[in-house]
Every structure is written in structure tokens, then in C-alpha cells.
Image (cartoon, rainbow, N blue to C red):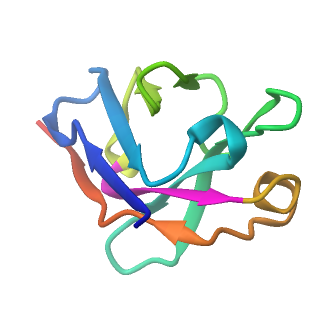
């Protein structure tokens, strides 16, 4: 069975940092494109970042460029999202998702989703 479990969310002050983790089971993360998505309160889900399994390329949504870094640890079967210089508009539930390459990162087609972890950026 395929499972994705996010962790690392919480309350952080503006300007602070968090590292989100996505633990995968039932498949190998280096065989799939892995994406991070955010759903802010009252808004649609948007892509934050994606890392490709085919060529190791990483992609970032326009709203997060420069402050976020996606990475993958194949030995641990984990994917991470390092977030720095956080702003209140980064608040939301963050989901990781897995999809076959290249449709995952290129077409935002993902087969498997985690349950999400809440990030709140506030004083």
C-alpha cells in the first residue's frame, strides 16, 4: 500500500524557517516525481515545488521562488521542503504528492497524496 505522511508543520513567526518532511512507503521516491502543494484558508490548492525523478530537476511556484528548497533522500525514502524567510501568506496546509514522471512535475498529475501538515506563519 502506498502512503505519504507529511510532518514538520507548526506555528512560526514571520521571517522564521521550517522544514517539512514527506515520508513515503509502498513505493520508492526516486521512481516518482514528488510535489509539494499548499492550500491556504479560503483558497485553492497551489503547487509550491516539485522534484523530478527523471532528471532531478526541481521546480518552484511563482509565489515561493527564492525562499523554499526541495530535496530528496533516497536512502530514507523521504522528500523535504526547507522553507525560510516565511511570510504570513505562506500559511496553509501543505501536502506532498507522488506522480509518474514526467507527468507529475510537467503536468501536475499526481496519483498519491498525503493528509497534509498545517503551517501557520504569525506573530
Residue at (65, 68) in percent of width and height: 110
Residue at (33, 26) in percent of width and height: 19
Above or below — where is 64 with respect to 55?
below
The overriding secondary structure of the stretch rendered in magenta is strand
Above or below — where is 6 with respect to 44?
above
Whole-percent x, y for residue 119 in the image: 25, 48
Above or below — where is 58 with respect to 115?
above
Q: In this rendering, does residue 60 appear at all? A: no
Depth check, front residue: 83 or 116: 116
Depth check, front residue: 84 or 78: 78
Number of marks drawn: 0
Q: In this rendering, does residue 78 appear at all? A: yes
Q: Which residues are magenta?
A: 91-99
Whole-percent x, y for residue 63 in the image: 62, 46
Location of residue 83 by image quarter: top left
Pick the quarter of the image with the N terminus: bottom left
Above or below — where is 10 with respect to 68?
below
Whole-percent x, y for residue 56 in the image: 79, 26
Residue at (41, 23) in percent of width and height: 76
Location of residue 39 by image quarter: bottom left
Pick the quarter of the image with the C terminus: top left
**Residue 73 in the figure: left or right of residue 123:** right
Depth check, front residue: 62 or 111: 111
Whole-percent x, y for residue 22 in the image: 38, 42
**Residue 107 in the figure: left or right of residue 19:** right
Location of residue 59 by image quarter: top right
Q: Residue 22 lies in magenta, yes or no? A: no
Amino acid at each position: 500500500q502506498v502512503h505519504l505522511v507529511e510532518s514538520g508543520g507548526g506555528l512560526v513567526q514571520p521571517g522564521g524557517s521550517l522544514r517539512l518532511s514527506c515520508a513515503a512507503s509502498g513505493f520508492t521516491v526516486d521512481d516518482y516525481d514528488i510535489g509539494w502543494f499548499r492550500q491556504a484558508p479560503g483558497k485553492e490548492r497551489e503547487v509550491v515545488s516539485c522534484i523530478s525523478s527523471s532528471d532531478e530537476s526541481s521546480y518552484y511556484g511563482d509565489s515561493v521562488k527564492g525562499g523554499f528548497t526541495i530535496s530528496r533522500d533516497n536512502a530514507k525514502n523521504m522528500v523535504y521542503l526547507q522553507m525560510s524567510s516565511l511570510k504570513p501568506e505562506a500559511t496553509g496546509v501543505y501536502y506532498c504528492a507522488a506522480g509518474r514522471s514526467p507527468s507529475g512535475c510537467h503536468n501536475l498529475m499526481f496519483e498519491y497524496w498525503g493528509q497534509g501538515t498545517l503551517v501557520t506563519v504569525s506573530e
